Amino acid sequence: MSAERVAVTGATGYLGSLFASAFQNDGHNVVALTRSKPTDQTMTWRRFELGETPDAALFEGVDVLVHSAWDLGNSSASDAWQRNVVGSRRLINAAHVAGVKKVIFISSMSAYTGTTQTYGLMKLAVERTALDLHDVVVRPGLVYGDDAGGMAGTLRKIAGLPVWPRFGHAKLFLAHADDVASALVRITDDYDRFASHVIGLANPERVDLSTILTSVSSDGRTKTSLPVPSTLVMTGLRVVEKARVPLPFRSDSLLGLIKATDVLPGQDVLSAAGITFRGLPR
Amino acid sequence: MDIVIVGSGPSAAAVCLALQDNPDITLTVLDLGGELEADRVASRSGLASSDPTGWDPVQVAHLSTPPKPEAPGAIPRKQIYGSNFPFADMGQLQGVAAKGSANDLVVSGAYGGFSNTWGAQVMPYSTGTFRTWPISRDDLEPHYRAILRHIPFSGEADDLEEAFPLFGTPSHLPTVSERTRRVLSRYEKNRIGARRHGVTAGHARLALRGSDCRLCGLCMTGCPYELIYSASQTFDELRRSGRVRYHSGVRVHRVEETSDGSSIVHATSATGGGAVSFTADRVFLCAGAIGTTRIVAGSLGITDTTITLEESAQFMMPFLSLRPVKHVTQDGEFTLNQFNLFINFDSDGKDASLVHCYPYNDIMMASLPSIATAGPLEAVTKLGLRHVTVGLGYLPSWASPQPTLRLGGRPNEGELPSITVATKDNDATAPMLKNVISRLRRAGRSLDLYPIPGQTKLSGAAKSYHYGGSFPHHASPSDQFSSDLFGRVAGLRNVHLVDASVFPTVPATTFTLTIMANAHRIASALAAGSLS
């Protein structure tokens, strides 16, 4: 595959940086579309802030847009919608107007029909726009690896507690960071096959919370878990959030954990392309 | 190339718009051509020549008599300028009967067809709708855009764009009512709460010259300034420019194809009853789904058969809000649909319902029993109406009762085949309606808009006027009751059905824009020489 110029929004975030490195390692030229200049000097930098009207120059010479930026800041729901959903639509539309040939929207496993998670509902709204424009939508599972961020990072902290929480029958799709990054590069190379599809990037076997905590804990041992009344915890977290007290774990994220999807979309397309995801080491 | 177009409704207008710039094409329109009575035209002109503040109340009353419902709580049949001319029998209703609660006024003989009295909503269909169609929304997009460039278009950018892109640059809507402002402002703050239940809210999108609106409140009984689009406006322009030959008072009953490849359109004069015929290279049937079905049946000799249609069933749903609005009046307001509630059960807008919400207008008061609107109870009723919004909702055809058309025996020459409209129940209707009500009830807090329990009423068969599907498009038509991608049925190769008779399904979302876009697509293919 010849080298392409790949613009990555959120290139300094956890997933964005994974993608940026993977594209660079595959010989592509990466343009970081971020608020501030990345420390990695090997990437070209163009200033971009999600929610702002994209400048036409943003996409000059760009072949591929990978949109992974998302603002999880503590703004009002209305502001968060404007910044993330309306901002993402503007970005995607601007990319098409500028003639960017391949657009990949990084969505989430929380985005499924029937989700009640704020984050999932927002991602789902952007998915619709991307799919109508025949872009590729990917939904990474819970991404784990050596430097896990996001939810996996939080779970690593939870694994350090003396007793683990147990939320009903919560099960999640997992994906190793290296597999997710490599899959995205391959999807970009084989773009037409994936266009207009929603692709779940994860191992197809769902894993329960206790197994996940065991695998991310420093000593690899399973600890005693106690059932936690999720409604009570949710209410507590929401009350604290209303009081604008910063928390390491948001109620919306907890909702994503206890009401996770059991559908992994696009597996037929992934299989046809020979893309697989490793399971958790036993 | 000589083209004959049968009818003057939205699909006929769209065909003409697609072909008008081709100098090699002549356009002849055959129409029954019923028009508003002369005295009402005079009253309308009188009002249109001045500002609402100076209007003569007698003329206003003459033009805005609110229609009465057939039964308490039923949706009254809309009148326009105090007239029922869009529903009048110009000969097109001869031989039409209905069983039970089914509608028998199913074909319009009016110049402009039913677009004289429509709700003027113009949104495209969702992408999901086309999952079961042999064409995609991408195929229709340029035609949606072309139509929206030609007709007046008012609306706003909002969350409904997600499923229903604007496909153009609308003018702003006129100032919306206090209730609409409140609901949409609450939605802006609480959209996640509403969307958790699959409910999206947004402004109405209307075929309306919103920037010229004088807020006289008469939209629902006929805009004196004629700011609401009717297909007759397109034909007025085409006739003024001499681009179409328009024949009024003509009832087409049959098309015959000859061995030399031309078509003969057989008709009778609606006034004298004499036979007339027109020769064409191509014929576009635009008589409305049921009108077109009768002409095709007459042309192909289809008799003693039952044809099942697809209809998006209509329901009336009154809502209650806890916070009242300040006033109950239509004065100083525009009274068309102002906001929509889209209830989505899937990810791409196929399994969905749409409710058009209307602010107060005098038809609401007129629909109530007289005991509630006069005497001591009037004040109480008005107090109650400050909390009320009326929604007109739709279910998709796959969850709606299906109208059936029973075709009678062979008609006499010069007559259309007789039909009896009836209805076939659908087991999916009650569960879906219940689901829609439940979703809206749960989203009620986010909008301060709650469906009033037990008051949602489903209309009878063919009463939504959103029906079609007698000869649905099919990629490879295999029987007599399907059409190819250009609306041609077996046995009629140069005749194109371009109204909703060719729709494979009828979703719950707005209907007419897609009819126009699809007709425009088919006619454009002809103009481009892509039809063999």
Image: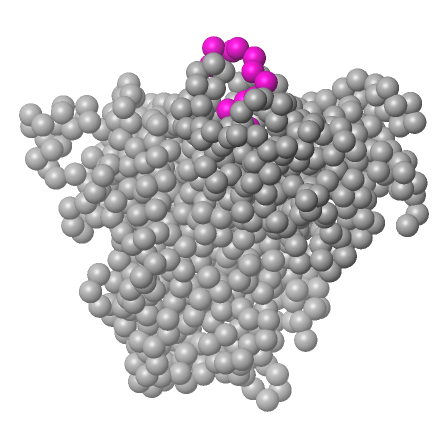
Magenta region includes residue B424: no
Residue nearest the observer in this picture, A228 or B256: A228
Report the predominant secondary structure element of the magenta stretch: loop
> In this picture, which residue range is highlighted in magenta?
A242-254
Quarter of the image with the C terminus of chain A is: top right
Q: Nearer the viewer, residue B532 or A270?
A: A270
Res B486 quadrant in image: bottom right
Q: Residue at x 76, y 43 (%)?
A: A179
> Residue A278: x, y in percent?
72, 47
Number of labelled discs?
A: 0
B373 relative to B194 in the view: left or right: left
Near-viewer residue (B268 or B496): B496
Residue B318 sits above or below residue B74 on the image:
above
- For the question of whether residue B454 can be seen, the reply is yes
- Residue B50 in sight here: no
Q: Locate residue B87: give its quadrant.
A: bottom left
Quick check: A32 left or right of B531?
A: right
Q: Does the magenta-highlighted stretch encompass residue A246?
A: yes
Colour mode of the rendering: one colour
Q: Residue B157 appears at what percent x and percent y?
A: 55, 32
At x 53% / y 30%, what residue is drawn?
A224
Counting from the top left corner in percent of width and height, residue B109 is at: 36, 62
Q: Residue at x 34, y 64 (%)?
A: B402
**A126 sits to left or right of B451:** right
Residue displayed at 31% across by 61% down: B427
Residue B476: x %, y % from top left: 59, 75
Q: Quadrant of residue A213?
A: top right
